[in-house]
Image (cartoon, helix red, strand yellow):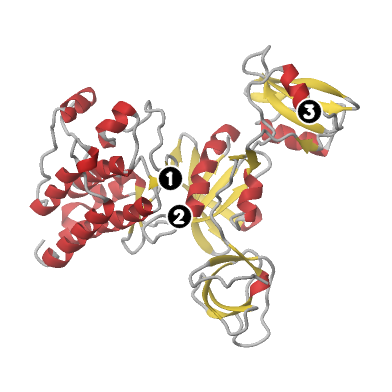
Amino acid sequence: MTETPWPQGTECVARYNFKGTSEHDLPFNKGDLLSIIVVTKDPNWYKAKNSAGREGTIPANYVQKREGVKSGGKLSLMPWFHGKITRNQAEQLLCPPETGLFLVRESTNFPGDYTLCVSCDGKVEHYRIIYHNGKLSIDEEEYFENLMQLVEHYTKDADGLCTRLLKPKVEEGTVAAQDEFSKGGWSMNRNELKLQQVIGKGEFGDVMVGDYRGTKVAVKCIKNDATAQAFIAEASVMTQLRHDNLVQLLGVIVEENGSLYIVTEYMAKGCLVDYLRSRGRTVLGADALLNFTLDVSEAMAYLETNNFVHRDLAARNVLVSEDNIAKVSDFGLTKEASSTQDTAKLPVKWTSPEALREKKFSTKSDVWSFGVLLWEIYSFGRVPYPRIPLKEVVPRVEKGYVMDCPDGCPEVVYNIMKMCWNLDPGARPTFQMLKERLQHISKGMGKNL
């Protein structure tokens, strides 16, 4: 039994099947998502509702509370991978010797290759893992797509090695991502996910429409173990954030072969920039545009309150639901507030001058991007800074250049854009202020816009 009652709205996941014994009970199957409505007089029971909206009582000890994955260590799909360490360092790490204790390191003698180091009968064996035609092999008989697949194989069968791989030597400060997602209640069953058609292609893999237990979902499918490792951070951030205007994570599937599936709610109308371009002025009135800006400001005010910085806010990273609600997505770059990152891949036209110049990311740099996003909305998806060559954008902006007001955009909204584009980050408004100002415009001018 849980010691303290969970508050209303708490999400939980079913640990077992529950058929129910009375008409007041809410039956469910293992893995179902439920939301707590209220604690009953008996603390062993909750009133809850399922994803279809049906309500009833459930036994408290049959469900697990869903919690944000906030691990004290670095989340890793390959906690046994130690990067560039020497042969001697590997041997010290595998001491005291324990048969089957293993790690993988980057080879120092053969850059680009890996070495599997295994403790066996008091000494350490080093097996070179060679690359051949894009695949990995130790004996050139068995080939693997990635390190996770290779390790998985040798944990089941020694297959020529001195011993089976029995126990990973985990890199210090690292925790197994699979365990953390499972503990937080975010692991999904791959057998229950039916992948359908591809709806987007990225350098990391495909985004597909799928079906999970009868619910239509969107799935990021990442096949490469190194890329999957980068997306683990995105998934863990998404477990900590919950808002009606953020695309909601439903769960994560980590396969032993290195594949990662990030399952989110399905957004029927795709990304906002395509939606604006395809519908245009004839379909989208002023109220629709203002509603999109309000939706995004709500999401960003929530991120601001929770000390998260998005870093890549743009119309391409906002998705539109069946009922025209805009939701912010793509938390690949989201980090806790005010950290730095490599600027080589930054979208210049959306990134604030201080973020480009000094790698300083903050809520205030998100506010700058929000101004550009407003311009995109009111210009129906045009690319910002039209007719200015990319290399000239930054120098001109730093001298105080601002884009013109889009055709038909109300002056009050254009003024908000200009507030966001203040060269002094400290002088830019907060998202809370932007949200309140947009709400005020919506109330006062909604009928006339």
Q: Position of residue 127 (x, y in %)?
A: 78, 21
Residue 235 shown left or right of residue 337 in the figure? right
Which sits earlier in the primary sequence, circle 2 or circle 3? 3
In the foreground, 411 or 278: 411
Which sits earlier in the primary sequence, circle 3 or circle 1? 3
Q: Is residue 284 visible?
A: no
Which sits earlier in the primary sequence, circle 1 or circle 2? 2
| Extreme-right residue of the structure | 121
CA gap, disc 2 and disc 3: 39 Å
Q: Which residue does the numbered mark 1 point to in the structure image?
A: 331
Q: Which secondary structure, mark 3?
A: loop
Nearer mark to the viewer, of 2 and 3: 3
Q: Position of residue 301 (x, y in %)?
A: 32, 54
Packing grade of label 1 (10 A; few <14, some 14-19, many >=20) is many
Instruction: Please identify the quarter of the rendering in which residue 241 is found.
Output: bottom left
Q: Which residue does the numbered mark 2 point to in the structure image?
A: 241
